[in-house]
Amino acid sequence: MMRNCFITILLLLLQTAHITAGTIVGEVALTPARPANTAINRYTGRDAVANKNIDTDDAVATAVVYLTGGPISSAVPPNEHPQMVQKDQSFVPEILPILVGTTVDFPNLDPVFHNVFSYSKAKKFDLGRYPKGHSKSVTFDTPGLVKVFCEIHSSMRAHILVLEQPFFALASEDGSFRIPNVPAGNYTLNVWQENVPEKQVNITVPASDSVSVRVD
């Protein structure tokens, strides 16, 4: 009888969690990540290659949409590590949103050495030089923006956005996004884009429905 009681309570809790969670669907106006033909010169190591120009067509226009405020979440980082791959002397993806406490792997798929590092306040690290087929990892335990570079190739750069809440999404190429399973409540919806002032919109998530939002 006690076992049946436990199962009933568990089912009720799961049902309640489902009922009190909503979904945010929306669209953001995307801005090109960099102006056309802009030389990237963030850092030059002693063996750095010459800077290369990057056209607007090569720059990724995307945005990270994330929530702050609202009910406090007790989410834990994923067991499977997200990756920021070094391929064709670029970081893939160039923008990676993660939950605080997440460990990110940095595999090298290029036939040359790379040295991934960051001087950002949220996370300072230097992985040292390592060849193709090797991978190193970093745990990001402080919220904030982490700018990632390669000590050998000065044109390589990426961003890791370390977030306190698990409710975030990377917008698609058309600017659309979807954030499911959000507990009902009032939030601030934040839109981060590279080299663009961050935008914020107040939003109320319903208990068992979806809410639409457009951020220009």
Image (cartoon, helix red, strand yellow):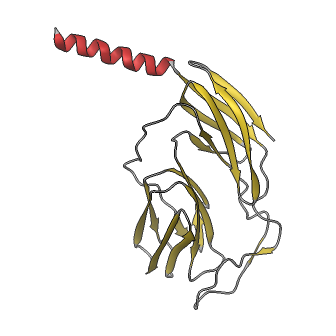
Relative depth, front residue between 98 and 145: 145
List x then y, in percent, for residue 148: 57, 68
As displayed, is residue 121 above or below residue 79? below
List x then y, in percent, for residue 134: 40, 73
As displayed, is residue 208 above or below residue 178? above
Q: Quick check: 79 left or right of 24?
A: left
Residue at x 63% of width, y 33% of height: 187
Q: Quick check: 6 left or right of 28?
A: left
Q: Quick check: 202 left or right of 180?
A: right
Q: Quick check: 126 left or right of 28?
A: left
Residue 84 shows in the view: yes
Residue 207, quarter of picture: top right
List x then y, in percent, for residue 42: 68, 77
Residue at x 79% of width, y 45% of height: 29
Q: Residue furthest bottom?
A: 46
As displayed, is residue 201 above or below residue 199? above
Quadrant for the N terminus in the image: top left
Relative depth, front residue between 12 and 59: 12
Residue at x 47% of width, y 36% of height: 73
What is the number of callouts on the image? 0
List x then y, in percent, for residue 153: 60, 80
Q: Residue furthest top?
A: 1
